[in-house]
Image (tube, rainbow, N blue to C red):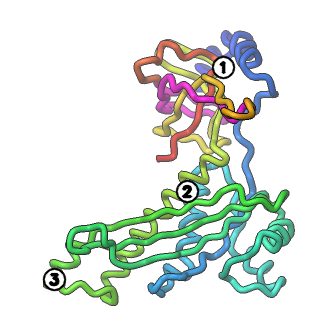
Amino acid sequence: MKKRLGNILCSAALIAMAAVCALIVRPCPLAAEKKRIAVLPFKNESQMHDSFFGNGLDDHLNAGLFQTKTYEIIDRSSLDAVLKEQRLGATGIIDPQTAVKIGKILGVDYLVIGNIIYAGIDDSLFLNTGAKVSIAVRMIDVATGEIIFAEKADGRKNASKLLEKYSNRYNLNLPAAKFIFAEAAQRAVGKIVDALYDVNPLEGYVVAIDGREAIIDLGREHGIAKGQTFIVYRAGEVIRHPVTGAVVGVKRMELASIKITEVDAATSIGSLSGEDKDLVRPGDKIRKKVS
């Protein structure tokens, strides 16, 4: 593997670096910088009260963010110690000023505040045979005190099998119902993880092409593993504000997918697929898919 990568990269290094530097104005990082983040315990404003809803959702969110490999998660014990020292409750809405204070003590970039705003019957389903959990999350930039992310997500789980088991007597207080609600809550958290990943995605570059394979500048040290998938894209049309004319974004032109087949310390090889895979060149950007 190392010999193979070495031969490919040595022959393509000058071309790849020239292409990358030609396409990118700013210095080219190997990967997105990991951001330090702390997730506060969710405040439960719903009618469901058990250990999962009390402490489990923030743990589930932490686990999901850890899997993205773009966030460094502050452990619960450190967070609890700071909250206790500042004489703050483990749950509850914290105003941005207080959040900034806590974040600076912890040395984090972002602080995440979450609320469980609903847990009950999913009335969108026929005969109301399901559970629905709604959560709201805000992320505060500790450096500025600004809320840079605010999202609401719903998670649903059909409970028709639960109805059959208890002869069509649907009762939220049944022990088995808690598992239904827990799964619905986890689905809502999964949507939040995907949205938070977009704030700081894992990105890199194609550095060389070898037939139907691409070599990227991300490897084991970046959390890359066999089987992961990346999207290859190129900057497209510039998006301008219709009134001010200011640039507000750039469209991404997706070219292909890369499925990782071999991983080294700082680089990986993957197979290219997609209608436009022949258009992929060294210097094109890549972005890890999380779902």
The structure residue drawn at horizontal position 15% and vertical position 78%, both measured from the top left corner, is 164
Foreground disc of the pair 2, 1: 2
Instruction: Say which element carries label 1.
Output: loop
The structure residue drawn at horizontal position 71% and vertical position 40%, both measured from the top left corner, is 32
Instruction: Say which element carries label 3.
Output: loop
Instruction: Say which element carries label 2.
Output: helix
The structure residue drawn at horizontal position 66% and vertical position 17%, both measured from the top left corner, is 9
- Looking at the image, tell me whether mark 2 or mark 3 is earlier in sequence order: 3
Residue 251: percent from left, percent from top? 59, 29
**Horizontal arrangement in the rendering, residue 102 relative to residue 165 (left or right):** right
**Horizontal arrangement in the rendering, residue 54 relative to residue 112 (left or right):** left
The one nearer the camera, 195 or 58, is 195
Q: Which residue is mark 1?
A: 283
Q: Quadrant of residue 30?
A: top right
The one nearer the camera, 239 or 198, is 239
Residue 133: percent from left, percent from top? 43, 72
Q: Which residue is mark 3?
A: 168
251 up-or-down from 193: above or below: above
Look at the image and say whether residue 258 sits in the magenta stretch. yes
- Number of numbered markers: 3
* Stretch in magenta: 247-271
